[in-house]
Image (cartoon, helix red, strand yellow):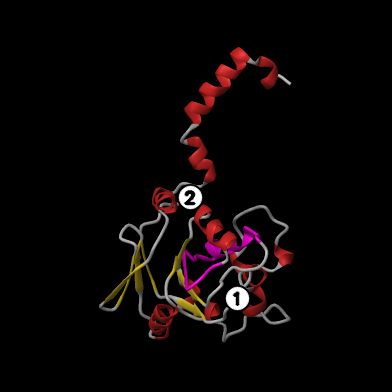
Amino acid sequence: MEKFNNLKSIPSYLSLQNIDTDMIIPKQFLKTIKRTGLGKSLFYEMRYDENGKKIADFILNKEPYNKSKILLAGKNFGCGSSREHAPWALSDFGIKSVVSSSFADIFYNNCFKNGILPIKIDDKIVVELAEYCKRKEEIEINLEKQEIKYGNKIVKFELDAFKKKCLMEGLDDIALSMEKISKIDDYEEKLQNTKPWVLNK
């Protein structure tokens, strides 16, 4: 997982509330177990018409928002089923941070495991940031300071210290386990010597 620290981007804004994981990545794209290749199907039913042609008015199909790394969204983003393909699709598209006033819990936690920073802030701030989307101006996210900078304003956001550490150091669940590999090896060696029948089934 890539390390996360500072992020600058022109944000894209989806004002819809209750965007669920099926809207983020529809069920027909869940057959893969790969984390790559899903970006083209992100928000599929909003981005494409019935013939598979891009809908010109959808924000992520427009320049420069098709290169946005920051997504602003309405409240309760990521509700619905717990599919991990949702953060995979966002990440593969290039989204590194989602900013909303509230998230579904499972989606929120899945983001951290896939290198995406979900930021909870007040609705009024989301609307203020949306103005920068309209003006095609960058905003900046500093993870270490837990700040969003836009124009001459700075707003702080809260974040769990462990989740912050994992993002800044690029640690997913596998990497966290590998940090303890020597202890795991020691335990297995001890088990082999004291209870060999456990490992030799």
Magenta span covers which residues?
82-103
Q: Is residue 173 magenta?
A: no
User: Which corner quadrant holds the C terminus?
Assistant: top right
Counting from the top left corner in percent of width and height, residue 21 is at 64, 67
Position of 66 with respect to 129 (left or right) is right
- In the picture of the structure, the residue carrying the numbered disc 2 is 1
Q: Quadrant of residue 146?
A: bottom left
- For badge 2, the amino acid type reads Met
Q: Is residue 102 magenta?
A: yes
Neighbours of disc 2 within 10 Å: few (<14), some (14-19), many (20+):
some
Counting from the top left corner in percent of width and height, residue 37 is at 61, 60
Q: Give residue 18's mark.
A: 1
Q: Which type of secondary structure does the marked residue at label 1 adopt? A: loop
Is residue 68 shown above or below 117? below
- For badge 1, the amino acid type reads Asn
201 and 105: which is toward the camera? 105
Position of 145 with respect to 53 (left or right) is left
Position of 81 with respect to 182 (left or right) is right
Q: Give residue 62's mark.
A: none
